[in-house]
Amino acid sequence: MNIQILGTGNYYNEEPNASFIINNNILVEMPAGTLKQLIKTGKNFSNIKIIVFTQLTLESMFDLPFFLMYEIANKRTEDLILIGPQKLKNYVYKIFNFVLNENANKYLSKLELTFLDANVIQKNEVSEDLYLSFIETNHPKYKKNYGFIIENSKTSICYTGESKVSPGLTYMLKKSDVCIWKYKENLLGLKEIKTLSEEYPIKYIPIGYNNINDLIQIKNIKTIKTEEQFYI
């Protein structure tokens, strides 16, 4: 598996917002600035087959309307699968209207879009020998909030999304070799991840953090720079 981190930061620092892409065809989250990161890193948009969202928020999805309009302008013919919490389609249409002040029905009918509920994605084969499973996690504000595990015959990676310590989160850590950890100080911050890394001594790759110097003290942390790639 090839993972490229498109952004390690958040809305309060200079790094691009947290997102990443798997094997150049599965995009995870589309916060503001993701479209420019995809262009900057030379991604072929027609290769992106799946976009994954772990929650229905503008923080997670702000650039999606711009991405879709970009693809409409470039006359995309390839199917595009969007996976996220229940009512994903309704939310996408809502933010398209809100962000662009355009009629979503008029434009999105020009694309071959499929919307899938994350709750039913359990070891679904998303490409040859690559399987995706969503796990419900705990967020104090959102009823439907997810992380996921993506695995092949050799290894597995989990992504926490925004989560408190919860049974869903610890289940993913037990099943994974590497965890991409979405830093959120009031949910899954330094204190929490330090405790988890001692109990589940796998490799943790943080995104969405404020200051890289805060992370160095934690055992099993591997910091990856924005636009850097790694293979497992």
Image (cartoon, rainbow, N blue to C red):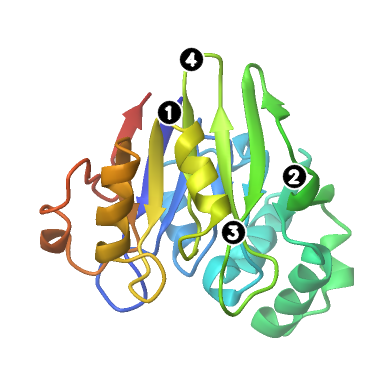
Q: Which mark is residue 154?
A: 4
Q: Which mark is residue 2?
A: 1
Q: Nearer the viewer, residue 147 or 211?
A: 147
Name the residue that disc number 3 marks: 137
Name the residue that disc number 2 marks: 80
What is the crowding at mark 3: few (fewer than 14 residues within 10 Å), some, or many (at least 20)?
many
What is the crowding at mark 4: few (fewer than 14 residues within 10 Å), some, or many (at least 20)?
few
Mark 4 or 2 closer to N-term? Answer: 2
Mark 1 or 3 closer to N-term? Answer: 1
Residue 163: image x %, image y %? 50, 63
Q: Please report contact status of discs 3 and 2: CB closer than 8 Å, yes or no.
A: no
Cα–Cα span, label 4 and label 2: 27 Å
Amino acid under label 4? Lys
Amino acid under label 2? Leu
Secondary structure under tag 1 reads strand
Cα–Cα span, label 2 and label 1: 20 Å
Secondary structure under tag 2 reads strand
Q: Is residue 122 above or below residue 152?
A: below
